[in-house]
Image (cartoon, grey):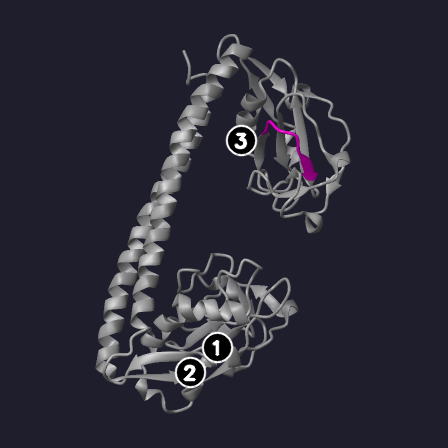
Amino acid sequence: MKEGWLEYEFEKCLNPFPRYNKISKKNFLSIGNFPIVSQEKKLINGYWNNEEDLIKITKPVVIFGDHTKIVKYIDFNFVVGADGVKIFDPIDKIDSRYFAYVISNLKLDDLGYARHYRVLKEAKIPIPPLPEQQQIVEKLDTAFVLIDRAKVNIEKNIQNAKELFQSKLNQVFSENGEGWEEKKLEDFYLIKHGYAFDGKLFEISENKDLPIVLTPGNYHENGGLYFTKKNTKRTHAKYPLDFLFDVGDLTVVMTDLSSKMKILGLPAIIESCNILHNQRIGKFISKGNDEHFDKKFLYYFLKSKKYLDKIKLTATGTMVKHTAPGRILDNKINFPSSLDEQKEIVSQLDQLSAQTELLQQKYKQKLANLEELKKSILEKAFKGELIN
């Protein structure tokens, strides 16, 4: 602890805060007179019109998401949204923005969706004299503005890389050149649903010879499949043998994970053995006349924005969206009748896809580096190393 600094128990840093009303998320307005602050990442999460629910602050306060661990510095009047919001009013010896930065720097155990305040209140808070707190805040604000600006530019570069690849896909599948045809997918394929595995029979196993169950959660929004350590151990005690995928099977997501619509309709090609076919995944089955197609050519069509946008528009369901085989197979695809020409296009798309993915990975690493830089600056700040 730096000379002249004190250390306070967490709850001794706070003034009591009056009781307040909380607005259920389902009642949030998209437009209104007063901003709603909840525990989600965005600063403002909705709006409200009833002034009786408005918290009128006399000095800035700090919001802590009890479930999410999100920390917000609030310097405006607001309405509290939903459950899990803690409002902290620091005592006069503590600058509110300094307090927000301190909490952001605390390494709290992740309790999932459980409440984290019981962990937070055990923390000890370093308290320098108020002028030093304000100097630290000024330094952190300046540094983080520059870091956040850099992050915005990197995120734009990631989006530009995605759009470049989608532009190429759009160009390919809008072709109507000599020797090209246009057919519905249903002319060549059926889509088979997987097996409705009984969740009670799932088990976790270290036995690598047992099959794992492929679910929508294994699909990456950029395409392809990924398996975490947890779900590579997730297998099933009983299953029909004809619901094992073959290597090379073309699959598609039939049911989304959430209302964000990020993976519905996405394709993937099975590249390894011992994978079970869940009912929320569709598998393309040839009608016996698909010699017209290179399978990877069809895979890239299923990654195109034109196709995915149509699937999203025709999806059904309120909270979780799903599609049906008929909606997928109703799509028309432009393709060259020459299989060699298809393979050449696939080769070009493979190269562009690999370059795009590599570029995105580099940008994502830069984002990770900036986050690490933020953490490093915060740690120095609360060790007293940021100012003289």
Query: Looking at the image, is 11 positioned above or below residue 374?
Result: above
Which quadrant would residue 287 be assigned to in this image?
bottom left
Position of residue 220 measured from the top left corner of the image (x, y, whole percent): 44, 61
Left or right? Give the position of 146 relative to 352.
Answer: right
What residue do we see at 71% from left, 30% from top?
55
Residue 78 colored in magenta in the image:
yes
Check disc 2: other Cα within 10 Å, few if <14, some if 14-19, many if 20+. some
Q: Residues within 10 Å of mark 1 (few under 14, many from 20)?
A: many
3D distance between C-alphas at marks 1 and 3: 45 Å
The magenta segment is 74-80
Residue at the location (62% across, 17% down)? 8
Most foreground residue, 90 or 157: 157
Q: CA distance from mark 2 to mark 1?
A: 8 Å
Q: Amino acid at mark 2?
A: Leu
Q: Which residue is mark 2?
A: 185
The residue identified by callout 3 is: 104
Q: Nearer the viewer, residue 214 or 146?
A: 146
Return the x and y of residue 142 as percentages of the image width and height: 41, 24
Circle 3: residue type: Ser
Disc 3: CA contacts within 10 A as few (<14), some (14-19) or many (>=20): some
The image shows residue 168, relative to residue 26, as above or below, that is: below
Can you see residue 294? no
Q: Is residue 87 shown above or below 83?
A: above
Dot in front, 1 or 3? 1
Q: CA distance from mark 2 to mark 3?
A: 51 Å
Judge from the rendering whether residue 30 lies leftward or rightward of residue 107; answer left or right.
right
- Residue bearing mark 1: 328
The answer to if 229 sits in the magenta stretch is no
Q: Position of residue 266 (x, y in %)?
A: 45, 68
Residues tagged 2 and 1 counted as in contact (Cβ below 8 A): yes
Sequence order check, earlier mark of 2 and 1: 2
